[in-house]
Image (tube, rainbow, N blue to C red):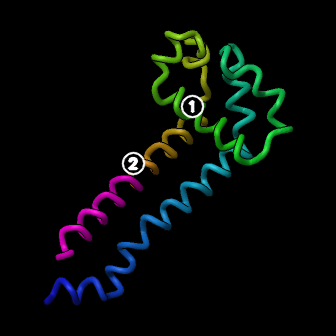
Amino acid sequence: MTGQQFWHSWLAFILLLCPLLLAVTNLSFSYYLSRRYLKEMLEALRRSQHFYRWTDSLPHEGRFTHFLMLAAVRGSMLWPGPAVRRGFLSSEDIGNFPSHLQRLLTIRNWMDVVLLVWGSIMYALLKLTKH
């Protein structure tokens, strides 16, 4: 009976609302990064075959394309090995990538980890308490 009372409390509501708030925060931070720092990130990757063309077309692209470009840069900086081996990314660009931009990408990646872990825990708790 105490399990049912807990899930009808404000604490349970807040715990279940947190993944949604984290998702909104993640999207807002991605929007901020794509509008404020994406051009600087693409200029830092100017020796890379995959990214050098994007800098010229950036002002003409929409929000969704900016999100996709940011996701590509994040993925390339998170796991640069495969992109370097395929020739999409220059190893010089990785070494010379500005540390403040790398820090912002790391923060964004950790926000994803926190969202996934929190959401998974809440999903597991809901599944365990259902009869």
Query: Which residue of the protein is positioned furthest toward the front in this rendering?
Result: 131
Residue, disc 1: 99
Image quarter of the N terminus: bottom left
75 or 29: nearer the viewer:
75
Which is more N-terminal, label 1 or label 2? 1
| Callout 2 crowding tier (Cα within 10 Å): few <14, some 14–19, many ≥20 | few
The percent position of residue 117, horizontal first and vertical second, equals 33, 54
Residue at image point 82% right, 30% down: 57
Residue picked out by circle 2: 113
Magenta residues, start to end:
115-131
Q: Quadrant of the C terminus?
A: bottom left
In the displayed structure, would residue 103 be above or below residue 84? below
Q: Quadrant of residue 130?
A: bottom left
Tag 1, which secondary structure?
Answer: helix
Q: Position of residue 98 (x, y in %)?
A: 61, 28
State which mark lies toward you, 2 or 1. Answer: 2
Residue drawn at x 60%, y 24% as measured from the top left:
97
Inspect the image, locate mark 1, and give the three-letter code of the amino acid beneath it: Ser
Gap in angstroms between the C-alphas marked 2 and 1 = 21 Å
Query: Is 98 contained in the magenta span?
Result: no
Left or right of residue 16, residue 89 in this image: right
Residue type at tag 2: Val
